[in-house]
Amino acid sequence: MNGAESLIRTALDAGVNVCFANPGTTEMPLVAALDAADGMRAVLGLFEGVCTGAADGYARMAGRPALTLTHLGPGFANGIANLHNARRAHSPIVNLIGDHATWHLKADAPLTSDIESLARPVSAWIRKTAGPGAAANDMAEAIAAAGRWPGAIATLIVPADCQWSEAGAPAPVRAAAAPRPIDSSAIRTAANLIRRHGAKSLLFMGAAALGERGLAVAGRIAAKTGCRLMCETFPARVERGGAMPWVEKLPYFPEQAIEALNPFGAVVLAGAPAPVSFFGYPNAPSMLIPEDREIATLATFADDTAGALERLADELGAPARATAAEAKRPPRPTGALNPATIGAAIAALMPEGAIVMDEAATTGLPFFGASRGAPRHTYLALTGGAIGQGLPCATGAAVACPDRKVIAFQADGSGMYTLQALWTQAREKLDVTTLICNNRRYRILQVELARAGITEPGRKARSLTSLADPEIDWSRMAPGMGVPAVRVETADDLVKQLERALAERGPNLIEMLI
C-alpha cells in the first residue's frame, strides 16, 4: 500500500466518501487510489472553484467533510474564493493538494509555489506530509481538525513521492473536538435581558441556532417572552417553512439594517457575532446595533448554541412547544417578471424538502419573505460575499441529498464565475433546477454607484456595470454543458416552466429575462 492508498483508505474509515476533484500530474497516485477505493465517490469539477464550492454545499447539508483534490498552488488558488465562503459558513472540508516530489522542489520548476501561504487565510489547520509513512496519520488528523465543531477547513499538502512510495496501513479514526459548554452566567445574563425588555428584545441568530433543534427552542422563547427572532444577512443554513418559527433576515444595506435593529433595547447573540456593515461608508458606523443598546452573547458559533438556547428556554420558563403559524403559500403570480413575482413563483411551487441556494443578489431580496409560509425547506446563502458560490454550492448540496430537490436561485453576473458547475450537474445527473436572473447587468454595482452619489455615471462606469453587449444567452450555453434550458419573459411562463422542471428529475435551467 502506497502513501496515497493509505491516505484515501483512512478517509473512508472516517466516513469521508466524496471527493470533488480537479487533479493534475502531481496527484496521479491519489487519482489511482480514488479509483481503487470502493465506496469513495469522485466528482470532477472543470474549475477548482466548482470543487471547493461544491464541497461547501455538501458539508452544509451532510454535516461531515468532503475532500477536494487540486493541483499544486495555482490549482488551489483557483478555489480559494469559495473556501473563503466555506470558512465563513464553518463548513468542514479537507483540501488535498499535490506538490512536487520533495527532491524536485529545489529545481524551482514552473509550477512551484508557496502553497502554505496560499492556504493559510482559508485554513484552520495546515500540514505538509513529511514522508509516505506519515500520510495516513496526517489525513486522520486533517479530518479530525475539519470536524471540530461546528466545522473548519483543513489543508493537507502531499508531495508526489509521499503519494507513490510504500507506506503503512490506514490510520485509526480520530475523535473531533466537541462544542464548548456554555457558562451558566451567560444563560442568566441573556434571560435577564429578555425579561427586562420583552417584546423589545431580539434573539440574533446564526450557525446551529438556525437548525431545526435551535429554531424550535427559539420559537418557544419567543412565545413566552414576545422577543423577536432574526438571522444574519447571509446565513450558512436555515431550516424554514412548515412548522418552523418565522425568523426575519437582517437587511443587506446598512441604513435598512440599522432601521431594523433600532426598535430593540436589547440584543442577545446566539451563534452569530454582532452584525456589522458589509462595507464601510462615509459617515456611517461599522457596527449596526445602536451604541446605547444592551448586548449579551449567549453562545458563539463554536459553542453548543442549540443547547444554550434550551437552557435559556428553561431559565425563562418557556412552554414545551410553541404554536406553529399556519403555513400559507403566496398565490401563483401573473404578469411581468420582476423580483417580487419571481420570489412568489418559487415560494408558490417549491416542493416539500427543497433546498434553495440563494445567490440571486438584488433580484432575490423578496424571496425570503415570500417563502415564509412555504413547505419545509432549507435555505443556503452566500456567506462570505465572494460571488460564484451559488451554482457549485447547489451542486454539492445535491450530491449530499440526492432525494431532495435543489433550487439554484442565481444572478447572471455571479453565475458566470462558475458556470462550469452545470457540466458537473449533468454528468452526475443531479436533481438541480437553476433559475438564472438575467437582468444583463451588475445591478448591485449600479445601486452602489447611486448610493455613492453618482446618479449620472459616465460611459466607462456604465460599461463596467453592464452585461448587455454582447448579451449572455444562458438558454444556449446550458445545453452545451448537457443541461436542458428554456428562456421565459413573463411570470405566467415562469410558473409554467418551473412547475415542469420541478416535476422532472435531473438538472434543468430556466433563464428569466428581467
Image (tube, helix red, strand yellow):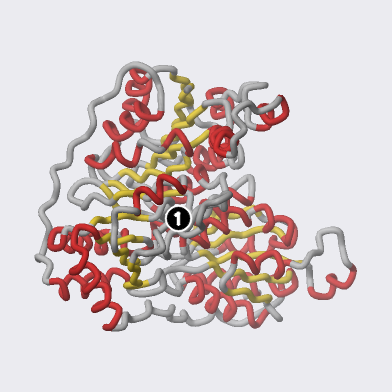
**From the viewer's perspective, is residue 490 above or below residue 434?**
above
Residue 501 percent location from the top left of the image? 37, 29
Residue 44 seen in this snapshot = no
**From the viewer's perspective, is residue 50 above or below residue 188?**
above
Number of numbered callouts drawn: 1
Q: Nearer the viewer, residue 281 or 406?
A: 281
Residue 104 seen in this snapshot = yes
Q: Please, what secondary structure does the residue beneath circle 1 have?
A: helix
- In the figure, is residue 366 to the left or right of 51? left
- In the figure, is residue 257 to the left or right of 413? left
Residue drawn at (37%, 48%) of the image: 259
Quarter of image, res 59: bottom left
Q: Residue furthest right?
A: 107
Type of amino acid at the residue the image marks with label 1: Tyr
Residue drawn at (56%, 72%) of the image: 124
Residue 303 percent location from the top left of the image? 37, 74
- In the figure, is residue 43 to the left or right of 47? left
Quarter of image, res 107: bottom right
Structural crowding at the residue carrying mark 1, measured as other residues with C-alpha within 10 Å and reported as few (<14), some (14–19) or many (≥20): many
Residue drawn at (59%, 42%) of the image: 418
**From the viewer's perspective, is residue 131 above or below residue 408?**
below
Q: Nearer the viewer, residue 270 or 485?
A: 270
Residue 363 percent location from the top left of the image? 44, 33
Q: Which residue is mark 1?
A: 58
Where, quadrant-wise, is the N terminus in this rendering?
bottom right
Residue 3 percent location from the top left of the image? 65, 74
Q: Nearer the viewer, residue 69 or 35?
A: 69
